[in-house]
């Protein structure tokens, strides 16, 4: 009668009685899954490193991002000449490249340190990566919730607006918006609202209008997604129960419906972040992005690609930085999707 | 089905109408005009120019006459002297009304930047270039993306799967403005394909369409894989196998067609993105397409070019989506339009 197997389960149950009954919230559960996903964790680490670089750029950057040393234009450290064999150092036959060990990743065509500009440029890309989705979530959720919950004529009207906005060629609209904002708010008279907006945009190096422009053109997908989710959740028992218990519309929408549809929203938005980053890079590329000399990876690629034959390092490093960041967001987005998708529960 | 298409076409007109109004208001509220120069033109010159281009009329009048020139067919009984102001895209001879009688339609107006060229001229010369790149990159995306997705779904969790999906995530992650300079550096320069040749053919399209289509190929590969994996778990696939069909037949005639449904839904938006996305590769590769004209027309307040480009692209997007919806019904008999 002393067989241990009979006793151990009881003993273990008595040891930690609380863990057996404690439920896990969706988010704690998702976080646990996310941590197990190596690619997602790597993505998260890269993003955190980038955030660190962006926040501490003034401290860790070796130089000023707009400091020009014209004598050192296009200079590279020696090791880069072995990476790009066609960059022949001065002194050798056909040599044209200035060698300088002062610049960890070389200097650009105006003699500015590329590493410094990369660190500062992280600010632009990351801000776009976070504020772009924020704008699109705020607008998209408002429109989608209203349409999905109100239904009827309001739903019809809002969704037709979404359809029309969908037919707008996005890139063309962004370019038009950017020009509109840039010139409309460049008002010289202080005191007006337009003037302060323009000043604020200047203060951010021209970033404000990029956020607005990108956000205004990319909320439609979010609105459709939210509406669909609301329609699916609206008829669920817990929402009906809340209504039957006399909860106000506001309470039902924001406390019962919204938290239950957050998962897909976050996943969808994380997966579109790369698109926002690319838009910013493209806008900077065609000269509608941040104002020089504020560095952005897009404008660095644009400047660098003009001389990519003779000094490929000027386009290589910003391109690498941009790709790595986008990779990280994609990894994180994929990981989040796997972590938050309830159908994946209990699979592993 | 016919009724559905007809309704969608009606909807197209409404969409174009709203878009034209938004664009018109937006571009006209941008400060500055087409004749604003750093060294200001004499007021009289500007007045004459504005009168010539009907810019002295009220905004609703200008809008109405612009839209009228596009949508309302005009009839001419005599020969029309070719000019930038009377350049119509569609000219139909009407022999029963007279020797030189014609019906002329779709006039996108003159461009303010040139006295002898119209917006239609710009479309005729540059739109085909942009569309070629858009279509070529769509072909690249489909030819690379869909087979890649199928291969990796059918060989799930093998080397092939990992390699394809690694490639796909790289394609999704690397923006066009990054791919393009690198393609030029590593392929364009060694193969002497770096710049657009006026008389070139296929080789002109090669690098731009790869640069533009690569990301979409990756997207399609991921979607195809996910969709095919899901379909392979369906009951009807088990049934097909149970009744003894060969694996090849199960995949080709049962799984593939059904797995293409979600893929087809993204083809429309994808194509739209590619056709407008050509602006990016045009800038990088120096291609004489619509992109350059659009960007400079906004900077120069060349209103007819802005309006015309946006309207044309919007119409194209709506039509592409319509086409996709029709294809959708053909693939999935459960879907009925009424």
Image: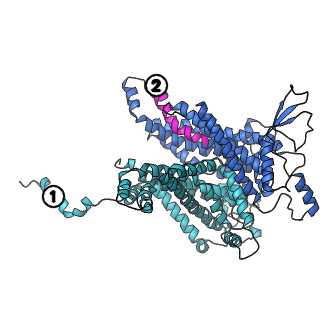
Chain colours: A cyan, B blue
Which numbered disc covers residue B269?
none
Residue A185 visible in this rendered orientation of the protein = yes
- Furthest residue in direction left, as rendered: A1
Label 1 neighbour load within 10 Å: few <14, some 14-19, many 20+: few
Residue A297 coordinates in the image, percent (x, y):
65, 60
Residue B286 visible in this rendered orientation of the protein = no
Instruction: Tell me whether the residue at label 1 lies in contact with that at label 2, contact meaning CB atoms closer than 8 angstroms.
Output: no
The residue carrying mark 2 is B249
Q: Give the position of the N terminus of chain B as an image quadrant.
A: top right
Residue A174 coordinates in the image, percent (x, y):
68, 55
Spatial CA distance of label 1 from label 2 is 55 Å
Asked whether B225 or B158 is in front, the reply is B225
Q: Chain of mark 1?
A: A
- Furthest residue in direction bottom, as rendered: A191
Q: Main secondary structure of the magenta part?
A: helix
Q: Are marks 1 and 2 on the same chain?
A: no
Residue A134 image-quadrant placement: bottom right
For the residue labelled by badge 1, is the local secondary structure a helix, a strand or a loop?
helix
Residue B250 image-quadrant placement: top left
Which numbered disc covers residue A10?
1
Q: Is residue A134 left or right of residue B285?
A: left
Magenta highlight range: B245-268
Residue in view at x 70 percent, y 51 percent: A172
> Relative to residue A9, is residue A122 depicted above or below?
below
Q: Give the position of the C terminus of chain B as an image quadrant.
A: top right
Asked whether B218 or B267 is in front, the reply is B267
> Relative to residue B292, is residue B77 depicted above or below?
above
Q: Is residue A257 left or right of residue B222?
A: left
């Amino acid at each position: 009668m002393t067989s241990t197997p009979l006793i151990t389960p009881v003993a273990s149950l008595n040891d930690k009685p609380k863990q057996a009954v404690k439920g896990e919230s969706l988010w704690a559960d998702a976080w646990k899954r996310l941590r197990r996903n190596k690619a997602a964790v790597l993505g998260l680490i890269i993003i955190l490193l980038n955030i660190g670089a962006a926040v501490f750029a003034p401290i860790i950057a070796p130089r000023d991002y707009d400091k020009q040393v014209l004598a050192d234009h296009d200079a590279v450290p020696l090791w880069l000449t072995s990476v790009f064999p066609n960059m022949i150092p001065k002194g050798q036959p056909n040599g044209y490249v200035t060698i300088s060990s002062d610049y960890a990743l070389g200097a650009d065509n105006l003699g500015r340190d590329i590493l410094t500009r990369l660190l500062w440029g992280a600010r632009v890309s990351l801000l776009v990566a976070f504020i772009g989705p924020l704008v699109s979530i705020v607008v998209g959720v408002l429109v989608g919730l209203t349409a999905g919950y109100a239904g009827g004529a309001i739903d019809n009207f809002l969704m037709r607006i979404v359809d029309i906005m969908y037919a707008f060629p996005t890139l063309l609209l962004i370019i038009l918006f950017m020009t509109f904002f840039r010139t409309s708010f460049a008002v010289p008279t202080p005191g007006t609202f337009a003037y302060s907006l323009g000043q604020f945009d200047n203060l951010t190096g021209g970033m404000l209008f990029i956020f607005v422009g990108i956000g205004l053109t990319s909320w439609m997908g979010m609105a459709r997604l939210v509406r669909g989710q609301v329609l699916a959740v609206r008829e669920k028992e817990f929402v009906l129960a809340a209504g039957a218990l006399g909860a106000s519309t506001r309470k039902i929408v924001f406390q019962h419906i919204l938290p239950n549809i957050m998962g897909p929203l976050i996943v969808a938005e994380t997966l579109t972040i790369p698109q926002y980053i690319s838009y910013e890079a493209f806008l900077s590329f065609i000269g509608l992005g941040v104002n020089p000399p504020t560095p952005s990876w897009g404008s660095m690629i644009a400047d660098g690609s003009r001389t990519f034959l003779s000094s490929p390092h000027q386009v290589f490093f910003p391109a690498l930085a941009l790709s790595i960041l986008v990779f990280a967001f994609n990894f994180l987005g994929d990981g989040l999707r796997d972590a938050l998708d309830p159908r994946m529960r209990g699979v592993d | 089905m016919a009724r559905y298409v007809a309704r969608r076409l009606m909807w197209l007109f409404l969409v174009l109408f709203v878009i034209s109004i938004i664009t018109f208001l937006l571009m006209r509220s941008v400060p500055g005009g087409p004749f604003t120069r750093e060294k200001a033109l004499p007021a009289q010159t500007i007045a004459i120019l504005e009168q010539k281009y009907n810019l002295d009329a009220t905004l609703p009048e200008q809008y109405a006459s612009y839209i009228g020139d596009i949508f309302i067919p005009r009839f001419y009984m005599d020969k029309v002297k070719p000019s930038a102001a009377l350049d119509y895209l569609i000219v139909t001879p009407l022999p029963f009304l007279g020797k030189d009688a014609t019906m002329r339609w779709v006039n996108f107006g003159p461009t303010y930047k040139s006295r002898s060229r119209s917006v239609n001229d710009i479309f005729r010369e540059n739109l085909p270039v942009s569309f070629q790149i858009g279509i070529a990159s769509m072909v690249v995306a489909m030819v690379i993306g869909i087979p890649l997705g199928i291969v990796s779904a059918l060989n799930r969790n093998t080397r092939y799967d990992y390699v394809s999906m690694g490639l796909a995530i790289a394609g999704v992650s690397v923006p066009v403005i990054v791919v393009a300079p690198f393609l030029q550096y590593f392929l364009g320069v060694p193969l002497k394909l770096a710049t657009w040749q006026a008389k070139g053919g296929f080789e002109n399209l090669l690098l731009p369409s790869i640069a533009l289509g690569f990301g979409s190929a990756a997207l399609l590969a991921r979607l195809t894989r996910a969709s095919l994996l899901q379909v392979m778990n369906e009951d009807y696939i088990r049934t097909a196998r149970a009744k003894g069909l060969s694996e090849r037949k199960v995949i080709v005639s049962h799984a593939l067609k059904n797995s293409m449904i979600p893929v087809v839904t993204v083809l429309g938006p994808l194509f739209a993105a590619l056709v407008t996305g050509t602006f990016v590769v045009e800038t990088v590769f120096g291609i004489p397409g619509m992109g350059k004209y659009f960007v400079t027309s906004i900077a120069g307040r060349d209103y007819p070019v802005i309006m015309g480009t946006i309207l044309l692209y919007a119409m194209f997007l709506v039509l592409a989506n319509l086409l996709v919806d029709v294809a959708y019904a053909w693939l999935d008999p459960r879907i009925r339009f009424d």
